[in-house]
Amino acid sequence: MRTDKTACQDEAKLGVAGRRRPILSPGLVPALGVLGATAALAVGVKLLNPSFGSLDQLTAILVTAIFLIVASFGQGLVILIGGIDLSIGVVMGIGGMIIAGLTRGSNDALFYALPAALLGCGAIGLVNGIGVAVAKLPPFIMTLSSGTTFFGVALGLTAGSSQQPVAPALQHFMSGRWLGLPLPILFTVAFVLVAVVFQNRTAEGRKLYALGSSPGAAQVLGLPITALTIAVYTISGLCAGIAGVLLAGYSASATLDMGNALLMPTIAAVVIGGARVTGGSGLYLGTLAGALFLSTLSTVITAFSLSQGFRSVVQGAVILAALLLQSPQSGLRKPWATRGERQVN
């Protein structure tokens, strides 16, 4: 007959076994799934169109993905704390207009035009953060209102497009190479490393996860909720500004609405990468995977000469599918999660 001591020991062993860490981090599963879907999409299109998938075409996909990769980082941080930034498209356009208007096709003014563009875009993010954190306005209303307001101001000042080309140095950066590799891809690698370390390997990043998971608990713990919220929206504006400057360099010119088409993809990249729209979860690697998938999908749509309307329908369907998978009623929400994670969720 088994003793109580033996039974307790068996239960303890079972408890340890139940708490064993999975071989693969739960947060990486959606990222790998999206990367797999991207590869499957490329292979499927290659079978239908043998001319698709050349080295130059794959390089072009990675180069053009830089705008979404950069802007989605800021959007991802905002969603991580349970918010949303609907001003990103406008901020990208303003960043491009500032850099084009100040450089006027010359490299001489680039040393002050670039900081001015980034500071201006960061300031718009700062206004969003103050509105959300201090004035307690809903993020949807605050960012939509600020985007509309700043778009109107910029439209009145510029008539919607820059009459001057962007500095040649920016154009060279978006088309140049170093050691045989495109400069935008090298920049993307550096940006991704910094973003991953900040979001998932620093104390500030962990504070953002805590804030998004439970604002009440974060307040009890004494986290600087107001400062963190303002900082996140400021970073989002700054990232949108960087993406806008790069987009202006890629296009050799700037228009005020050039970032509008990237607003929904920034949200889609974050959501299909595994982040919850309610905040508190998600890895930047998942956002990166989502951005690469959407960039590949966009290239495929262009290759088959499909309409912009079809592109919007596909993006909307991707977001809807990701949200349905996150819904508890679907029965598919995080099937890879551990028992403890399911209890928390």
Image (cartoon, helix red, strand yellow):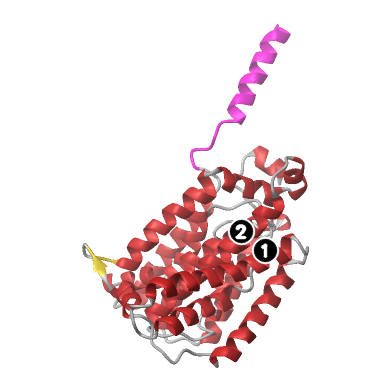
Instruction: Residue at 46%, 89% (x, y): give it.
Output: 162
Which of 248/11 is in front?
248
Instruction: Residue at 51%, 66% (x, y): give it.
Output: 239
Give the residues drawn in magenta, as a range. 1-24
Instruction: Residue at 36%, 62% (x, y): give it.
Output: 187
Q: Can residue 197 be seen at all in this image of the molecule? A: yes
Residue 171 place in picture, x, y as percent: 33, 78
**Residue 170 is a magenta residue:** no
**Amino acid type indicated by mark 2:** Val
Residue 340 place in picture, x, y as percent: 67, 38
Which of 39/196 is in front?
196
Element class at badge 2 = helix
Q: CA distance from mark 1 to mark 2?
A: 7 Å
Q: Is residue 194 above or below residue 344?
A: below
Q: Is residue 193 left or right of residue 25?
A: left
Quadrant of the rendered image containing residue 101: bottom left
Q: Is residue 6 above or below residue 27?
A: above
* Disc 1 target residue: 129
Instruction: Residue at 53%, 47% (x, y): give it.
Output: 200
Dominant SS in magenta: helix
Which of 1/62 is in front?
62
Q: Can residue 84 be seen at all in this image of the molecule? A: no
Point out the image quarter for the N terminus: top right
Mark 2 Cα shell of 10 Å, populated few (<14), some (14-19), many (≥20)? many
**Amino acid type indicated by mark 1:** Gly
Disc 1, disc 2: CB below 8 Å?
A: yes
Mark 1 Cα shell of 10 Å, populated few (<14), some (14-19), many (≥20)? many
* Disc 2 target residue: 232
Of mark 1 and mark 2, the one earlier in the sequence is 1
Q: Residue 50: which disc?
A: none
